[in-house]
Image (cartoon, grey):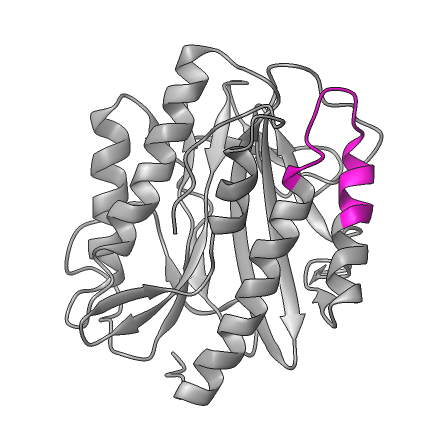
Amino acid sequence: MIAIKSEREIERIRAACELVGRTLAEVAQRIVPGVRTRDLDAIAEAYIRDHGGIPAFKGYRVGGRRFPAALCISVNDEVVHGIPGDRVLVYGDIVSVDCGVLLEGYYGDSAYTFVVGETSPENERLLRVTYEALYKGIAQAVPGHTVGHIGAAIQAHVEAHGFHVVRDLVGHGIGRHLHEEPPVPNYGRPGEGPRLVAGMTLAIEPMVNRGTWKVKTRKDGWTIATADGSPSAHFEHVIVVRDQGAEILTTFSYIGQLLASESLPHGQAAGH
């Protein structure tokens, strides 16, 4: 069943999303050559707990397995669910950081793909197109449309630029639970899937590969990587469907402020 949120619930989700945005900015400051991904994870967990939240991913259970970290950090050909560890980031890596927070009974969730220093022009284009596709999808989240409108807009923009959307992983509803109905695919056709109504809260998250859309699961049982080893990018916002259109509850504005600083290595545009 798809939960329709009250204004009180939306404000609580917004508060959790705000903490997610600030946490991602804390991590963004430390994404430099030589840093270990486990160190980024420790920074995020401390920041979340210091601000009254609980890392939503840590201990998340699938079957008999629990995710061991506060962040999912996925590097280069890793699409999502990368486990932070001893890996050291090097100049030119692209790094997707996915963060979830539970705050006062409600969840926030957002992801951003960073560049360590500079990367290839084709990787830069991959990030730009994925970022744009996120907003193409959000623009379709209006009452009367379906989740298929969102997926179709994302897919059309991505494929028009020669890239591919991952089919095996999707966005989702969010609120009292990290993952709620409905699933929000990054592909499809307008009119397919559940119809959108005001008060739905959705996590829209295009995952885009430079090569094949196919993916595989690494031996650790969590990390999803591209099947052909090509680079991948991931951006995510939580939105609420309003009568007049989608309202974005998460924010990249704190990341944007940091990346605009001359002391930081990467200037990826980061509005909203």
Image position, residue 61 (x, y; %):
72, 62
Q: Left or right: 267 with respect to 96?
A: left
- Residue at far top of view: 120
Residue 58 visible in the snapshot? yes
Q: Which residues are magenta?
A: 28-43
Q: Residue shown at 47%/80% (left/top)?
A: 11
Up-down: is 140 above or below 230?
below
Q: Quarter-wise, where is residue 211 in the image?
A: top left
Task: Please tell me how many numbered marks the rendered image carries.
Answer: 0
Up-down: is 37 above or below 174?
above
Q: Left or right: 25 with respect to 181?
A: right
Q: Residue shown at 43%/55% (left/top)?
A: 237
Q: Residue shown at 77%/45% (left/top)?
A: 41
Image position, residue 89 (x, y; %):
72, 23
Image position, residue 251 (x, y; %):
47, 55
Q: As rendered, which of 140 and 27 lies closer to the eye?
A: 27
The magenta stretch spans residue 40 = yes
Q: As rendered, which of 47 and 38 lies closer to the eye?
A: 47
Image position, residue 261 (x, y; %):
55, 32
Q: Quarter-wise, where is residue 118 in the image?
A: top right
Q: Residue shown at 50%/33% (left/top)?
A: 260
